[in-house]
Image (cartoon, rainbow, N blue to C red):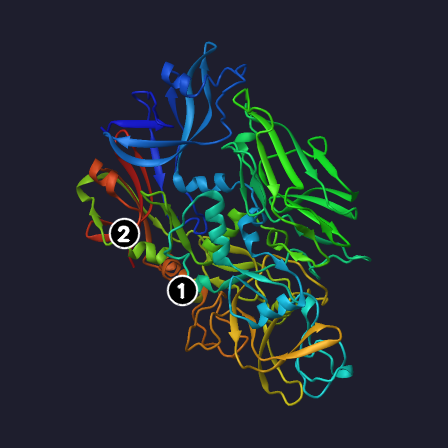
Amino acid sequence: MQKLQLYISGTRVDLFKDESVSITQTIQNVRDIAKIFTEFTQSFTVPASKTNNILFRHYYNFDIAVNSFDARNKVSANIELNNIPFKKGFIRLEGVEMKKNKPYAYKITFFGETVNLKDLLEDDELSALDTLNSNNLDYTATNVRSNLVGNVDTIITPLITHTKQLYYDTGTHVAQDGNLYYQGGGGTNLHGVLWSDLKFAIRLYDIIQAIQTKYSITFSTDFFNSSNPTFYNLYMWLHRKKGDVEPAQQVPMQFTQVSGFNAYNTPSPETSTSNGAIVIPSSLVTSPAQILGFSLDLTPTTNDAYDIQIYRNGSLYYQKTNVQGAETLTDADFTLTAGSFTISIGSTSVVTFNSTNIVWEINGQLGGEVIGGWTDIWRSTFTTVTSTTFEFIITEQIPKMKIIDFLSALFKMFNLTAFVDDTGTIVVRTLDSYYSASSVVWDINKYVNIDKGTVDIALPYKEVEFKFQGLGTFLAKQFEQLENTGWGTLSYSLDNAKYDAPSESYTVEIPFEHLQYQRLVNATGGADTDIQWGWSVDDNKESYYGSPVIFYAIKITSGTAISFMSSTSANQSESDYIIPSNSRALASGTSTENINFQLETNEYTGGTTFTGTLFENYYKTYISAVFNNRRRLTKVKAQLPLKIIYNLKLNDKISLNNNTYKINSLTTNLITGESSIELLNEV
């Protein structure tokens, strides 16, 4: 029997003497291979003792309004076994058992630390990552060109068009069409890719960095690092809406985000500023803390008309149009909720604000006490707020996607696994590297209950389908119609055999758009060019939105010259440019890695030597073993000693009856030490 101690927010919890507390651990379950963040316990109860009543603030008494326990959120907790730290995590209060109108027990559930990532990120979208706005730039022909022909950096312009079709033909010249063959002289020779047919893209690594900054978390550098080109060379196309970046207007109105707010008075610790955003945490809007009111004063130095837009987490929250002169907005206009708020000013002409002419003051109370007067004041340091140039604000152009969905998509693509180490770092590794990181083998023969056990079929499904959610662009749809399968999609069963037991299929679906790219050939003569491009239109050749697009960026240097149009009346020749690709390199001799699941004909080479698919590199070892006819799922019960319970890692091996096993799942009664173990034999 172990002695169990549970601490919630540093307070030791009273426990029932006979309560069973079990914890289930699994890093990758053969029944649900795409599921991540799975460590948890079954619910258990603790007595409604004096200590626990204080800890849970008499939750059963709903008349207590001030300082009541908030069961909507998990609270930090840790478990000790025989006074030795065992697990850190979080407790969620599920409810209170009553007997004779008196509290008897609190029902709680313990969760591992990794699970809390979902709670931390909540439903926030990528647009909430305000630190990305340090990369904002004007959307001009000059900036589009410089990021197309320049170095592969944080922000690039890939050769992906949102509407116009590109081609290459040295023999035909039609003004204003998408022929990339360069000829000077204007007139019928003026064709090529118009700068406004292109959009910027941002490196995925910088999105990961922004997530860490905003939520004060740290990912390990095992996979998310600048020395790992498999990940570091990936980009997301900044494609928030189909078609043009700028909205179609009779008279163009250009918006500029106020560049930043600085605290004028000493700010309350409950508020902060970040890259032009005022950050309102949930602690300031959840009872008993609350915002009592605010005043946003805007005083331009000119009398030109302008529009005000307030964004929350990168999405438009409030706007007021055709404002002239000084304007004051208050809580009668909109409500401040938790989130990152930014201000954009729009006008058809230049509107100027001096550095102290935009002031946002917030008044609130915390814990029932008024935070004296207007305590938090920010003032803009931006002088000329609006010009006639459209500003490309990253958080307003990044695709609509939840941050947790973005992370989950990467985890599914590369079969990543995560756990929290002793320093609080979220360790992210590929599953294969996670298993190979441990050489420890635990011999549990003398602890196993030999009276009962089972050996089951390990195959929980007849096949696994790996695919991308977004296959709606023209070339991808055309591929599907011709090949009767999705572009980059793989349906896997060992040796392509057909199994009828069991009957279900399992799908791993990645919520990204998977474009098929096209290497251009000269329509006159058929010679290959160095140009590869992407076309974001549907099968009717109309502008298309779809899911977020990710791709590898590859710089072409001294390649086939293309015609870049800086306006409808001017073009120039460019032999350096950035192309999109599904493979990390253009030659399989350099790298065979690509982001297809199925081995496909490479768009650039026309060959099938890019064998480093997502399945081959990240899933094959695990999945092929699952389908192996020799694989079994063995279930045993064991009375494990504390030294094993405390030190066992899920990537350790188990030795039983002269066989070696991986751990599929482990459920341990923390009081008795009895464990139910699911094991997968090595094949």
What residue is at 50 percent from the left and 58 percent from the top?
Answer: 204
SS at badge 2: strand
Residue 640 point in image, percent of width and height: 23, 38
Which of 325/585 is in front? 325
Q: Residue furthest left?
A: 446
Q: Residues within 10 Å of mark 1 (few under 14, many from 20)?
A: some
SS at badge 1: helix
- Label tally: 2
* Left or right: 348 in relation to 281: right
Which of 67/609 is in front? 67
What residue is at 70 percent from the left and 59 percent from the top?
Answer: 389
Q: CA distance from mark 2 to mark 1?
A: 22 Å
Q: Which mark is residue 661?
A: 2
Residue 596 makes an appearance in the image: yes
Residue 203 point in image, percent of width and height: 51, 60
User: In the rendered view, would you say 297 is above or below 158?
Assistant: above
* Left or right: 655 in relation to 74: left
- Quadrant showing the N terminus: top left
Which of 290/255 is in front? 255
User: In the rendered view, would you say 563 is above or below 4?
Assistant: below
- Quadrant showing the C terminus: bottom left
- When asked about the image quadrant of residue 519, the answer is bottom right
Q: Residue furthest top?
A: 100
Residue carrying label 1: 617
Q: Amino acid at mark 2?
A: Tyr
